[in-house]
Amino acid sequence: MIRSLRYQYLSLMWLILVLILCNMHMDSITADQPTFFEGFDKLVHTGLFYVLTLLILRGKLKQRAEHSLRFTTILKIVLFSVFFGALIELLQWKVFTYRSGDWWDLFCDALGVAMAVFSYFCLRWDKYAKVF
């Protein structure tokens, strides 16, 4: 367990940053400045979870010292990332009542995870092409 956490230090730091950013009080920030465009929040959620999933995949690749991951490992990473997004939305809905849990935010979290896995498969296509 400790050995695997050693390779995930970047993803752990990013996970803590995402947890803080998604649960902090945003009224003072958004009251002074308008958002760039409608739906900017959704784009931020997608980007945060894209980077989180890529960092977890990177850490797992470094831990295994190979150039590819098994499908079960990738599935576990996807489930963990989507579960973390659902946990954040649940925290926003029940604990941090100044924020609101949103199904579209969870969808954008899952979209960011899917984009990261797709990017991984595109970069590692030569390893997985024989499977398809």
Image (cartoon, rainbow, N blue to C red):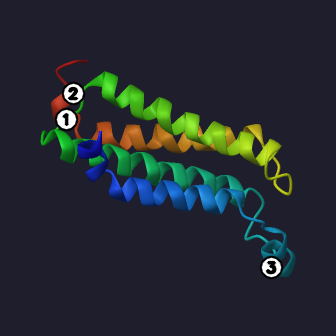
2 vs 1, front mark: 1
Q: Residues within 10 Å of mark 2 (few under 14, many from 20)?
A: some
Residue lying farthest top? 132
Q: Which amino acid does label 2 sit on?
A: Tyr
Q: CB of mark 2 within 8 Å of CB of mark 1?
A: yes
Query: Can residue 123 be seen at all in this image of the molecule?
Result: no
Q: Mark 1 points at which residue?
A: 68
Residue under the image location 45 percent in, 33 percent down = 78
Left or right of residue 39, residue 57 in this image: left
Residue under the image location 66 percent in, 45 percent down = 88
Q: Distance between the residues labelled 3 and 1?
A: 44 Å
- Residue 130: percent from the left, percent from the top? 16, 21
Depicted 5 relative to depicted 20: above or below: above
Q: Is mark 3 on a helix, strand or loop?
A: loop
- Residue 11: percent from the left, percent from the top? 40, 53
Quadrant for residue 124, please give it.
top left
- Residue 21: percent from the left, percent from the top? 64, 62
Depicted 24 relative to depicted 123: above or below: below
Nearer the N terminus, badge 2 or badge 1? 1
Residue under the image location 40 percent in, 26 percent down = 75
Q: Which amino acid does label 1 sit on?
A: Ser
Q: Residues within 10 Å of mark 3 (few under 14, many from 20)?
A: few
Q: What residue type is labelled 3?
A: Gln
User: Quadrant where the N terminus lies?
Assistant: top left
Q: Mark 3 points at which residue?
A: 33
User: Quadrant where the C terminus lies?
Assistant: top left
Residue 128: assigned label? 2
